[in-house]
Amino acid sequence: MYELYGRKVQLVRINGSGTSTDEVAAKADADQAAADGVFAVMGGPTQAESFETELARKHILCLGSCVISSPASTLAEDATVPVGDRSDTGTDRVDDHLAHQSAAVG
């Protein structure tokens, strides 16, 4: 159970505009997520590193499979991406990730 302090979670589906390896489309998808005002993204083009990098640049949380293709050095540079076991997809590390985010922002 999480305390939302009166806020409500609204799930927004953003359809990808390219293949899982299309770097240009991945950046455009991250730009679309920012334009839609999302707080976090779950999933994404798993083989396009620009998706995760652009989300991090825009301070949007990246949870789940959107970090698979990024090398550990890139993850370490991006404050919005959890650093940890590279075999982990992140879905079972949400609590750790959010704690990392709170520390990075605060």
Image (cartoon, grey):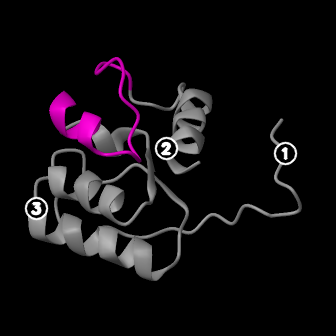
Identify the residue shown where x is 89% and y is 62%: 6
Which of labels 3 and 2 is toward the front? 2
Quadrant of res 26? bottom left
Identify the residue shown where x is 38% and y is 70%: 15
Give the Cα distance between marks 2 and 1. 20 Å
User: Dot 2 surroundings within 10 Å: few (below 14), some, or many (20 or more)?
Assistant: few
Residue 55: percent from left, percent from top: 34, 60
As shown in the figure, which amino acid type bears the numbered disc 2? Answer: Ala
Residue 57: percent from left, percent from top: 31, 62
Quadrant of res 85? top left
Q: Helix or strand or loop: what does disc 1 sit on?
A: loop
Give the Cα distance between marks 1 and 3. 37 Å
Which of labels 2 and 1 is toward the front? 2
Quadrant holding the N terminus: top right
Residue 59: percent from left, percent from top: 42, 60
Identify the residue shown where x is 32% and y is 75%: 31
- Depth check: 57 or 103 in front? 103
Quadrant of res 46? top left
Identify the residue position indicated by label 2 in the image. Answer: 104
- Depth check: 77 or 28 in front? 77
Give the Cα distance between marks 3 and 2. 30 Å
Q: Helix or strand or loop: what does disc 2 sit on?
A: helix
Q: Is residue 92 left or right of residue 84?
A: right
Identify the residue position indicated by label 1 in the image. Answer: 3
Identify the residue position indicated by label 3 in the image. Answer: 22
As shown in the figure, which amino acid type bears the numbered disc 3? Answer: Asp
Mark 2 in CB contact with mark 1 (< 8 angstroms): no
What is the span of residues highlighted in magenta in the rendered image?
Answer: 71-88
Mark 3 in CB contact with mark 2 (< 8 angstroms): no
User: Dot 1 surroundings within 10 Å: few (below 14), some, or many (20 or more)?
Assistant: few
Residue 65 higher or lower than 37, as above or below: above
